[in-house]
Image (tube, grey):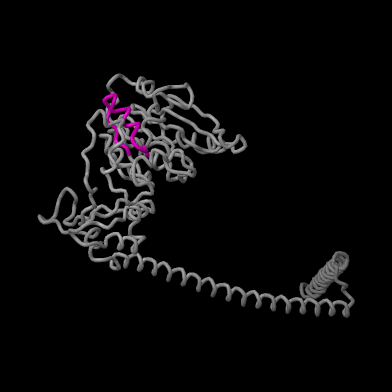
Amino acid sequence: MGSKDEDHPKKKVCQLSIQTKLKLKILLLIVLTNLVTIYIFTQNSSLPLWDSTSLLHQLNSTQHELAGSHSQISDFRRKLASTTSLIESLLAELTSLRESEKTTQGNDFFNLSDEAKLAIGPHKLPLGFSPRSGSDNVHPPVGGGCLRFPEELTKYMTYDIGKECPADDVFAQRLILKGCEPLPRRRCHPKSPLGYVEPTRVPESLWTIPHDKSIIWDPYTCKNYKCLVDRQKSPGYYDCKDCFNLKGRERSRWLIDNGGLDYGMDQVLGTKPAGSIRIGLDIGGGTGTFAARMKERNITIITSTMNIDGPFNSFIASRGLIPMHVSVFQRLPFFENTLDIVHSMHVLSNWIPDTMLEFTLYDIYRVMRPGGLFWLDHFFCLGSQLNGTYVPMIDRVGFKKLRWNAGMKLDRGAEKNEWYFSALLEKPMT
């Protein structure tokens, strides 16, 4: 047996041999791994690994395409900058126009005549602040649309204070129909009829043509009532062409109920307890015959109408009835839940823009008392509008249908697809 010193070198040689084998195995494993990786890469890559010429060509092509992309990006950036500049310019112009419009609207008041400013401008209350209005100023009620027509408004307010007003009835009514409603008050006197004749007494006045000297004829084509009565025989279109003839069709209106479009007044009133219909409004009531029929039944009806080439308001007043010179677009000057009945024949029809008509129907609903009647008489529309527009609109407002009748208007031919519908509607009790 050898000593411990003799065994030590043998152990070192043995350990060195083991480490060398381990390193060779690791090296062999690395080589094999790299070979496998190269094999896989050459099998799946579209690039020819060993073809340096082809690889260089593709690299040059990629660089060329990248340079082209940079050029396109630069072009897009220039276009984007140009577009941004254009948008900024348009926004600046729009802002300028808005500011100019605000300034113009703000200056409209200052461009008016002194009399117009006095008529529509604010006035200090003599006793100071009023808790009822919450202000120490009062503004005369003038239609907001008036300020859109400063030149016309100034013309309307140009007159000699305390003297006779200009003969401008037609001009004033056109201003109303543009939306300047109500017109401002004026400090002048309207022209009075020369040789004025007192009106006929009630009840004879209800069916009597008034005297020609009861009104001023200057604004109208006809210069006497005979001309208005005979106008039904004349060619051409006139508003309410035959309604000045009180001995003609006017005499029989609303007396007969045919079960269709024509409702009888007594049948309509019969839907409510006797005496419960007492006051109401007729919208666009022509010469006031509806109100005359109601007056015979002890019911007071106010008739709204315009003077479209005829003295409708004066004619209504001569019959002993109450006229109201307002357009169909004005908020009804009645408090809510007050009227027993509202009637309209022909005026409420499809010539009114849908949204404005819906506002009107809601306003009618507002002034009617619960259980009140809305008599929509001969509403004109096209067949496509009947169920597509107006039935849903009336349902949205919330009226209850008591009667509903529709019929085709055939005087211009069935191919026109023109229709009338009449309806008796009720405001619900709750």
Regarding residue 14, the answer to whether it shows in the image is no
Magenta region includes residue 240: no
User: In the rendered view, would you say 375 is above or below 22?
Assistant: above
Horizontal arrangement in the rendering, residue 223 relative to residue 136 (left or right): right
User: In the rendered view, would you say 155 is above or below 402?
Assistant: below
Depth check: give the residue in front, 365 or 37.
365
Q: Residue 356 appears in which quarter of the rendering?
A: top left
Depth check: give the residue in front, 339 or 191.
191
Q: Residue at x 77, y 79 (%)?
A: 64
Pinpoint residue 52: horizontal percent, then vertical percent: 87, 79
Q: Residue 320 appears in which quarter of the rendering?
A: top left
Q: Residue at x 29, y 42 (%)?
A: 212
User: In the rendered view, would you say 2 is above or below 360?
Assistant: below
- Numbered marks: total: 0
Quadrant of image for the N terminus: bottom right
Depth check: give the residue in front, 421 or 396.
421
Pinpoint residue 37: horizontal percent, then vertical percent: 83, 67
Magenta residues, as a range? 284-303
Q: Residue 398 appears in which quarter of the rendering?
A: top left
Depth check: give the residue in front, 288 or 372.
288
Quadrant of image for the C terminus: top left
Pinpoint residue 193: horizontal percent, then vertical percent: 24, 48
Pinpoint residue 395: horizontal percent, then vertical percent: 45, 33
